[in-house]
């Protein structure tokens, strides 16, 4: 090892250290941004070091440099453009897309490496079979990377609405999954036994790519955050395997770090939704055959409420709790809700926001949206913190939230049972802004809507809030 | 088992333990940004993609490594930028410096 290589390896080590410290700092809101910048700095050092090493070694010819620079320009341009222009509501699907390409890149490294080794062997330049210490991580990298690639694309498509968010049954279901897993396992063992075959590798690739699709399709849109987080952890593992294939420590460290921290994060997310990761992968809401049919609303009647009545209730209340949900996010109504809140505050009403851990599309998503609309951070209250206060609230204003307010979750035997909910029904009166009586992701009726204390204001979240603002102003 | 493989395995296992330890009790608010931040870190695969691109000689290898570099760079650049945009939202705005901890629920203002 010469001096240059030593220096570059230390640069890689510095990068890895920055990733660890950056992730630690991202555990707390106060230091999170700083942590992300630290991590980005580490990445820049690691990539810069690699470029210096390649340049100094002179092993990369002109063509290779064109490939590298063109690839960086294309990928970097696309990444920068999409990341800067994406709407706050569409962020989760973009993260999933970035995860897909990361997994794809990891798989390509192993595929390329394997084909080269196979070619060398055909040309009899490589005396022995591909050693097990290469063959094992190669297959694992290809399998995990391919599953993440298609799985993340499907997850992204579901969040974008390109693919329906509701669970889609794969024809053949379990049988297909088992068959794909069996094909992959047999092919993997064949390669590990010392056989060298590029076609068999492609069988593995095809089976894994299909597996990624069949794994995510049957999962409902509400569970996508957990799935994306799980696939994120997968990509980390695939990158670590790529590190073993090409013998690069920084890939191993960063990949293993993301693989492990991603797994913990996935569990935290699933816990926040009171779901188990296994259950989600096994089929999600309504996917299982044994789901109890829900009678739901027991034939109660729904009371429709006019804008002016709702405005009066809000304007003369002392305490109002706003419950924003996914409908608010898709309608881009975060600015309208802030305007209404400011108007009410000017009239002396106490306003706070009850944020369910999974409000919006992902945990923490609603906080980001409301912060974007300049809602003061102290007004955003977490579920456990605000639930006892619903009893003292004169009005709970539910905007586009459904399943997370359904009192049915307190009873056993419904698809939402056990899910932590906001105690909206404890408020003295309830106003629900909603487009229709449509169901949420869980696919069941919301008992809150037939509560005698509830008035339904049927409108699109943004339009409904704008109407309320106008009506409050006119009072 | 070669010393290199043993060394790599050591690093791998310790990094996994490190990953487990590094995530502590995270408020739900930060779940999405944290996932996005971790997502950017596996963009380190760009280093590997550059290495294979440097030694690519035949056309297939060149195409594969070009796609790998482009994919990985998209992961790195997009990941960090989008995470930063999310976290920017958490920065305390001057308006947030209201005296009342607006949560108490009681004591309506004026």
Image (cartoon, coloured by chain):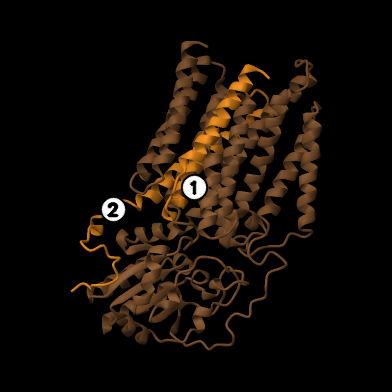
Chain colours: A brown, B orange
Location of residue A337 in the rendering, given as x and y in whole percent from the top left corner:
36, 70
Q: Secondary structure at mark 1?
A: helix
Disc tally is 2
Q: Quadrant of the N terminus of chain B?
A: top right
Q: Nearest the camera: A422 or A125?
A: A422
The residue positioned farthest toward the top in the image shown = A2
Q: Nearest the camera: A473 or A214?
A: A214
Q: Secondary structure at mark 2?
A: loop
Label 2 belongs to which residue? B92
Image position of A353 with respect to B84: above or below: below
Residue A74 visible from this viewpoint = no
Q: Identify the mark nearer the N-term, 2 or 1.
A: 1
Location of residue B93 in the rendering, given as x and y in whole percent from the top left corner:
27, 55
Q: Quadrant of the C terminus of chain B?
A: bottom left
| Label 2 with label 1: CB-CB less than 8 Å | no
Image position of A291 with respect to A150: above or below: below
Mark 2–mark 1 distance (CA, rounded to whole Å) = 22 Å
Q: Residue at x 58, y 87 (%)?
A: A299
Binning the other alpha carbons within 10 Å of mark 2 as few (below 14), some (14 to 19) or many (20 upward) gives some
Location of residue A458 in the rendering, given as x and y in whole percent from the top left corner:
46, 81
């Amino acid at each position: 090892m010469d001096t240059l290589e030593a220096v570059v390896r230390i640069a890689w080590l510095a990068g890895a250290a920055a990733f660890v410290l950056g992730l630690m700092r991202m555990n707390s809101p106060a230091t999170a941004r700083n942590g992300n910048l630290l991590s980005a700095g580490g990445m820049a050092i690691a990539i810069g070091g690699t470029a210096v090493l390649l340049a100094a070694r002179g092993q990369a010819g002109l063509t290779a440099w064109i490939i590298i620079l063109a690839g960086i320009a294309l990928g970097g341009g696309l990444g920068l453009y999409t990341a800067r222009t994406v709407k706050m509501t569409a962020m989760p699907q973009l993260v999933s897309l970035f995860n897909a390409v990361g997994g794809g890149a990891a798989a390509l490294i192993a595929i390329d490496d394997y084909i080269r080794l196979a070619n060398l062997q055909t040309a009899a330049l490589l005396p022995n079979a591909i050693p097990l210490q290469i063959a094992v991580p190669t297959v694992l990298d290809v399998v995990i990377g391919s599953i993440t690639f298609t799985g993340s694309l499907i997850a992204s498509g579901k969040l974008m609405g390109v693919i329906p968010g509701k669970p889609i049954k794969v024809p053949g279901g379990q049988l297909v999954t088992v068959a794909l897993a069996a094909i992959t396992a047999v092919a993997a063992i064949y390669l590990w036994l010392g056989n060298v075959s590029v076609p068999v590798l492609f069988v593995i690739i095809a089976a894994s790519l299909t597996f990624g699709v069949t794994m995510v399709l049957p999962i409902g849109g509400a569970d996508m955050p957990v799935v994306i987080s799980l696939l994120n952890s997968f990509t980390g593992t695939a990158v670590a395997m790529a590190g073993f294939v090409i013998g690069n420590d920084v890939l191993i460290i960063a990949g293993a770090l993301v693989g492990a921290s991603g797994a913990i994060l996935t569990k935290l997310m699933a816990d926040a939704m009171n779901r188990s990761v296994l259950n989600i992968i096994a089929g999600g809401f309504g996917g299982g055959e044994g789901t109890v049919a829900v009678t739901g609303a027991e034939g109660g009647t729904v009371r429709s409420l006019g804008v002016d009545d709702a405005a009066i209730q809000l304007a003369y209340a002392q305490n109002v709790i706003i419950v924003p949900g996914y409908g608010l996010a898709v309608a881009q109504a975060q600015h309208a809700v802030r305007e209404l809140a400011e108007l009410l505050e000017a009239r002396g009403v106490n306003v706070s926001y009850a944020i369910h851990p999974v409000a919006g599309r992902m945990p923490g998503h609603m906080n980001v949206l409301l912060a974007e609309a300049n809602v003061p951070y102290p007004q955003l209250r977490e579920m456990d913190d605000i639930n006892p206060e619903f009893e003292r609230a004169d009005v709970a204003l539910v905007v586009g939230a459904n399943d997370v307010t359904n009192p049915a979750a307190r009873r056993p035997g419904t698809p939402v049972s056990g899910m932590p909910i906001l105690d909206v029904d404890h408020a003295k009166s309830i106003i629900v802004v909603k487009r229709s009586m449509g169901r949420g992701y869980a696919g069941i009726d919301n008992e809150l809507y037939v509560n005698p204390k509830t008035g339904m204001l049927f409108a699109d979240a943004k339009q409904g809030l704008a109407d309320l603002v106008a009506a409050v102003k006119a009072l | 088992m070669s010393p290199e493989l043993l060394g790599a395995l050591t690093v791998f296992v310790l990094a996994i333990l490190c990953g487990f330890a590094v995530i502590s009790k995270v408020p739900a608010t930060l779940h999405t940004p944290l996932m996005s931040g971790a997502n950017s870190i596996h963009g380190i695969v760009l280093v590997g993609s550059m290495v294979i691109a440097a030694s690519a000689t035949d056309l297939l290898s060149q195409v594969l490594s070009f796609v790998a570099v482009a994919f990985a760079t998209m992961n790195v650049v997009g990941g960090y930028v989008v995470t930063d945009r999310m976290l920017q939202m958490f920065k305390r705005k001057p308006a947030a410096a209201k005296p009342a901890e607006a949560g108490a629920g009681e004591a309506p203002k004026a």
